[in-house]
């Protein structure tokens, strides 16, 4: 990176950081706006412009979508590193996702003129575009932020904190604006607003591209090149059209496969990806110290699935709970169910700085918990959140509407668990992974999020099947609470072994 003013660089951040901040904010506005609407739109009656799906079918779609959005970044990162560079890949991802959001909007606007099968195909086509586009956009904009700073630059952690603020600001605005429009005006306007957010994201980055200096340019770009030229944009358009056509073909072929076969293909696909990542890691890990640290990553990645299978109930069953079982009236005005999705990002903005200070204070006192203990605490907070959710669900039995404060408190407690676990996990990967395999091991970590998101959507259905077959009486929220509690206890018991296996890394 070229430094035009070395003195200033020590006390401030480059303008490019704020370009990326706003670009990411508008993309997250789009994603979290549509995510807040997804299950509600699918379960809304046909007369209300929805699809009239039952909970099981809607949550299965949610499971597949939220699972795959954590897998495709592996592809997007590879394409950027090998062929296009990060900047072009971000543009492609943004444009492709915009098309996806407008397809979702069209599926809603055309509810009265299209038959249900054609609408569902259009909807699935849009989701496919979002899955692939997210894979191109998400990993590469984050790594451009890192490219501005050397690893030892004291501003680097601060830069990612600023960038993370953009993510959460978008996560707040999306459900407020897109969610509110979709739920209270028309579903299509919610998705249309999400699509407009992506157009703003791409246009903002384009108009401010010069502030990115040379970061994220295609491989072997000339030394005097600062912005993408006409040839680059032709490639962007061609790749974007290519991804649209590939997605169209995949959705068409997937629709021809019997449901009984797709139920098998999905878990097989997860296992296949896991096997491929395991092979690359096996070939690249050398020496007892690297293997010891890798074992810690694998163990905690497995437990990470448990946490996210619970956490991602937020956009699924807890979203439906807000819609169906919560008293949302304030006087004569009804709070949109989608707005409860804002509690988590607001809580992150409040508590993340507190946690950052807390860890530093504890470290000075030599009381900072080791990574496995923080994981265990995250699980215990999650267990507490779902115990509270179980109480709320019991109060709602028989059609009673419960106070909205139940959901607010549950989301806040769950966010405390997230802050104990999620940022700590990302930091752990950069510390414990073999230097040559950091990106691949990060892919493994993302795969654990994908599996957790998938199980979040299908867990209710799995428990219902087990109850019908074995008369086990398992209920979703108590089951998650007990599973998280048990997992937290297991991690605490294993923590001395895991600490030793980390070989001196805190």
Image (cartoon, rainbow, N blue to C red):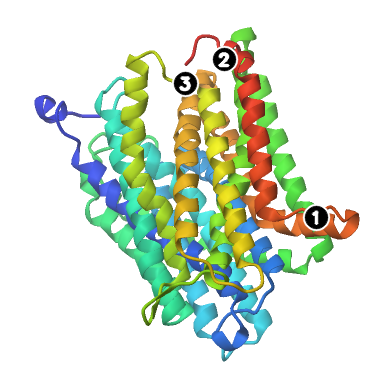
Question: Cα distance, mark 1 to mark 2?
Answer: 38 Å
Q: Position of residue 444 (x, y in %)?
A: 60, 34
Classify mark 1: helix, strand or loop.
Answer: loop
Foreground tag (1 vs 2): 1
Instruction: Classify 10 Å Cα crowding around label 2: few (below 14), some (14-19), many (20 and above).
Output: some
> In front: 393, or 289?
393
Foreground tag (2 vs 3): 3
Q: Earlier in the sequence, mark 1 or mark 3?
A: 3
Asked if the residues shown at circle 2 and circle 3 are in contact, with their CB atoms under 8 angstroms apart, the answer is: no
Asked if the residues shown at circle 1 and circle 2 are in contact, with their CB atoms under 8 angstroms apart, the answer is: no
Please give the name of the residue rendered at 61% of the width and 79% of the height, measured from the top-left corner: 119
Q: Earlier in the sequence, mark 2 or mark 3?
A: 3
Q: Is residue 347 left or right of residue 387?
A: left
Residue 243: numbered disc: none
Classify mark 3: helix, strand or loop.
Answer: loop
Q: Position of residue 432 (x, y in %)?
A: 52, 20
Please give the name of the residue rendered at 38% of the width and 60% of the height, measured from the top-left corner: 29
> In front: 100, or 461?
461
> In front: 215, or 416?
416
Classify mark 2: helix, strand or loop.
Answer: helix
Foreground tag (1 vs 3): 1
Mark 2 highlights which residue? 499
The quarter of the picture where residue 184 lies is bottom left
Q: Earlier in the sequence, mark 1 or mark 2?
A: 1
Mark 3 highlights which residue? 369
Instruction: Classify 10 Å Cα crowding around label 1: few (below 14), some (14-19), many (20 and above).
Output: few
Q: Is residue 48 left or right of residue 147?
A: right
Mark 1 highlights which residue? 473
Please give the name of the residue rendered at 26% of the width and 57% of the height, measured from the top-left corner: 204
In the depicted structure, whether residue 108 falls above or below residue 99: below
């Amino acid at each position: 990176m070229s430094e035009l003013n070395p003195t200033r660089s020590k006390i401030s951040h480059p303008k490019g950081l704020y370009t990326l901040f706003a670009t990411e904010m508008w993309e997250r506005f789009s994603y979290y706006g549509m995510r807040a609407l997804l299950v509600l739109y699918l379960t809304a009656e046909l007369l209300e412009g929805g699809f009239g799906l039952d909970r099981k079918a809607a949550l299965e779609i949610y499971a597949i979508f939220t699972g795959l959005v954590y897998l495709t970044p592996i592809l997007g990162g590879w394409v950027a590193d090998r062929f296009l560079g990060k900047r072009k890949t971000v543009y492609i991802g943004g444009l492709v996702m915009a098309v996806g959001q407008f397809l979702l909007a069209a599926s809603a606007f055309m509810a009265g003129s299209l038959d249900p099968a054609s609408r569902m195909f259009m909807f699935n086509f849009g989701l496919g575009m979002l899955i692939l586009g997210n894979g191109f956009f998400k990993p590469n904009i984050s790594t451009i932020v890192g490219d501005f700073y050397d690893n030892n630059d004291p501003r680097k952690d601060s830069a990612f904190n600023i960038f993370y603020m953009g993510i959460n600001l978008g996560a707040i605005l999306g459900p407020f604006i897109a969610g509110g429009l979709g739920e209270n005006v028309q579903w299509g306007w919610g998705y249309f607003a999400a699509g407009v957010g992506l157009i703003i994201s791409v246009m903002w980055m384009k108009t401010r591209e010069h502030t990115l200096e040379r970061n994220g340019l295609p491989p072997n770009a000339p030394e005097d090149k600062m912005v993408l030229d006409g040839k680059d944009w032709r490639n962007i358009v061609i790749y974007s059209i290519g991804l649209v056509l590939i997605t169209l073909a995949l959705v068409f072929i997937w629709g021809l496969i019997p449901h009984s076969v797709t139920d098998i293909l999905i878990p097989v696909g997860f296992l296949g990806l896991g096997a491929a990542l395991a092979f690359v890691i096996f070939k690249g890990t050398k020496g007892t110290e690297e293997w010891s640290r890798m074992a810690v990553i694998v163990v905690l990645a497995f437990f990470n699935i448990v946490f996210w299978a619970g956490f991602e109930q937020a956009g699924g069953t807890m979203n439906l709970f807000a819609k169906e079982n919560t008293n949302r009236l304030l006087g004569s005005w009804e709070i949109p169910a989608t707005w409860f999705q804002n509690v988590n990002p607001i809580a992150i903005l409040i508590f993340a700085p507190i946690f950052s200070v807390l860890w530093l204070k504890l470290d000075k006192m030599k009381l900072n918990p080791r990574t496995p203990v923080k994981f265990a605490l995250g699980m215990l907070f999650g267990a507490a959140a779902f115990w509270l959710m179980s109480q709320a669900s019991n109060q709602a039995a028989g059609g009673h509407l419960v106070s909205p404060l139940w959901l607010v408190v549950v989301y806040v407690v769950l966010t405390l668990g997230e802050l104990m676990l999620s940022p700590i996990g990302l930091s752990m990967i950069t510390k414990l992974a073999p230097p040559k395999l950091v990106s691949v091991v990060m892919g493994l970590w993302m795969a654990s999020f994908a599996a957790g998101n998938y199980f979040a959507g299908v867990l209710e259905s799995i428990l219902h099947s087990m109850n019908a077959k074995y008369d086990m009486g398992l209920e979703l929220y108590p089951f998650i609470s007990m599973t998280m509690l048990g997992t937290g206890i297991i991690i605490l018991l294993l923590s001395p072994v895991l600490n030793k296996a980390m070989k001196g890394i805190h």
